[in-house]
Amino acid sequence: MPVLTRLRAHLRLRQRLRPSAAVNADEELAWWLREWDPAAGEDQRWERAHDAVAMVLRESGIKDTIFFDGKVVVDIGPGALGFPDACPARVSIGVDPLAQRFADAGLLLASDAIYLAARAEAIPLVSGSADVVLARNSLDHVDDPRAALAEARRLLRPGGTLILNFDVDHTPTPTEPHALDAHEVRSWLAPMEVVFADRWPHPHGRDGHAVVLVAVQP
């Protein structure tokens, strides 16, 4: 039996035996196994990782192509997409509770990026240590979105940048349990200054639509 087939069968068995939070984590991992084949060529995966960096800048209205260079960048909930690996930061950190499981499944690229297997609400980094914090399509996945944003603000140094991209008005799912409201999320950012905002007609997921907010730490 192929390795991926055995792993997916194991995940299905564990889903019947574990509590809901663990089941949701298994569903997240299973999704990445479907979308990001460990057997895919390294060149193809690196191309997608570099595309992710350019995509974040474009979506956020940041025209400076070297915006991340020389900075400490924290990506909350990167999954196995590869943004932390390709980001040209001085220090690039991916925070994802499934980071170790991604690594064990062969889903992470070999790079200088640091991955922390931690929750968005409790990130083991010193306050004021990050120049940029990014949360793209992850805010509705966390246990407590408001607490996750408070943690993001804690990590940012004065003048640091928070980049958010999240779905609103969508139907909650087991892996995306929060139906976020754009105005409420914006209120959670105070006293940060929102310097860029955009609304997409389409969502990351099945319904609703996406909102992009870029805010600066006072």
Image (cartoon, helix red, strand yellow):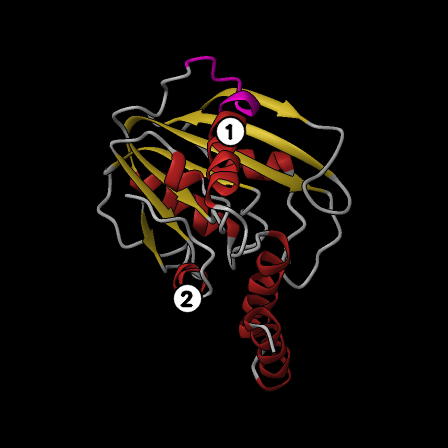
Q: Is residue 85 above or below residue 145?
A: above
Density class for disc 1 (Cα within 10 Å; few <14, some 14-19, many ≥20) is some
Density class for disc 2 (Cα within 10 Å; few <14, some 14-19, many ≥20) is few
Task: Farthest residue to the top: give it.
Answer: 63
Q: Which residue is mark 2?
A: 104
The location of residue 161, given as percent across then percent down, is 38, 27
Q: Is residue 105 above or below residue 158?
A: below
The location of residue 115, given as percent across then percent down, is 34, 52
Q: Residue at x 52, y 23 (%)?
A: 60
Provide the residue span drawn in magenta. Answer: 56-64
> In the rendered view of the protein, which quadrant contains the C terminus?
top left
Corner quadrant of residue 5: bottom right
Whether residue 170 appears in magenta in the rendering, the answer is no
Q: Residue at x 61, y 66 (%)?
A: 27
Q: Is residue 70 left or right of residue 106?
A: left
Amino acid bearing label 2: Asp
Q: Nearer the viewer, residue 13 or 34?
A: 34
Q: Which mark is residue 2?
A: none
Corner quadrant of residue 137: top right
Q: Is residue 12 left or right of residue 128?
A: right
Q: Is residue 7 above or below residue 38?
A: below
The location of residue 110, given as percent across then percent down, is 35, 49
Amino acid bearing label 1: Val
Q: Nearer the viewer, residue 38 or 113?
A: 38
Q: Which residue is mark 1?
A: 56
